[in-house]
């Protein structure tokens, strides 16, 4: 129980600081520390991220850091993309999903380092 709370705490801090959504921390933690299947880890991380996003958004709002027009436009795309992504989770093999996630993480790391 404590390990799970600590994982959520760390993901919450990172989500609040970097607006990463916490999934970059939660999915690997669920898979390698909690020993959850990758499919279940991805789905569970979405549920876990929701409270982090809500509370972070409240603070970003208080500090007047939200571009509402841009956020709303992206949210519309996010609703559609999220539904498609959730459906694709069942159709793509775990090995391919893992490879896609690794490529995404590597790309993100390279962008952070060099751009």
Image: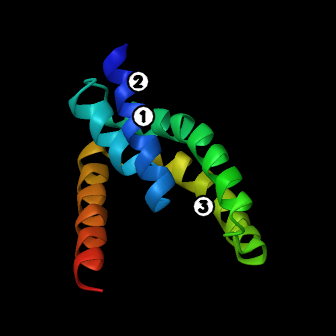
Contact (Cβ within 8 Å) of mark 3 with mark 2? no
**Considering only vertical position in the picture, is 46 above or below 32?**
below
Label located before the other in sequence (1 or 3): 1
SS at badge 2: helix
Q: x, y (%) of residue 20?
A: 45, 58
* Residue topped by disc 2: 5
Can residue 90 be seen from the camera position used here?
A: no
Mark 3 or 2, which is nearer the eye? 2
Quadrant location of the N terminus in the rendered image? top left
**Considering only vertical position in the picture, is 23 above or below 31?**
below
* Residue topped by disc 3: 81
Label located before the other in sequence (3 or 2): 2
* Residue topped by disc 1: 9
Q: x, y (%) of residue 108?
A: 31, 69
Residue drawn where x is 28% and y is 62% of the image: 105
Q: Residues within 10 Å of mark 1 (few under 14, many from 20)?
A: some
Mark 1 or 3, which is nearer the eye? 1
């Amino acid at each position: 129980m404590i390990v799970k709370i600590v994982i959520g705490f760390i993901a919450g801090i990172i989500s609040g600081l970097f607006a990463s959504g916490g999934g970059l921390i939660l999915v690997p933690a669920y898979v390698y520390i909690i020993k959850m299947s990758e499919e279940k880890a991805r789905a569970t991380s979405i549920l876990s991220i929701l409270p982090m996003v809500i509370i972070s958004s409240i603070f970003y709002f208080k500090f007047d850091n939200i571009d509402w027009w841009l956020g709303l436009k992206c949210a519309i795309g996010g609703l559609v993309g999220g539904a498609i992504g959730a459906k694709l989770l069942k159709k793509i093999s775990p090995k391919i999903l893992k490879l896609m996630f690794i490529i995404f993480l590597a790309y993100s790391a390279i962008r952070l380092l060099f751009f």
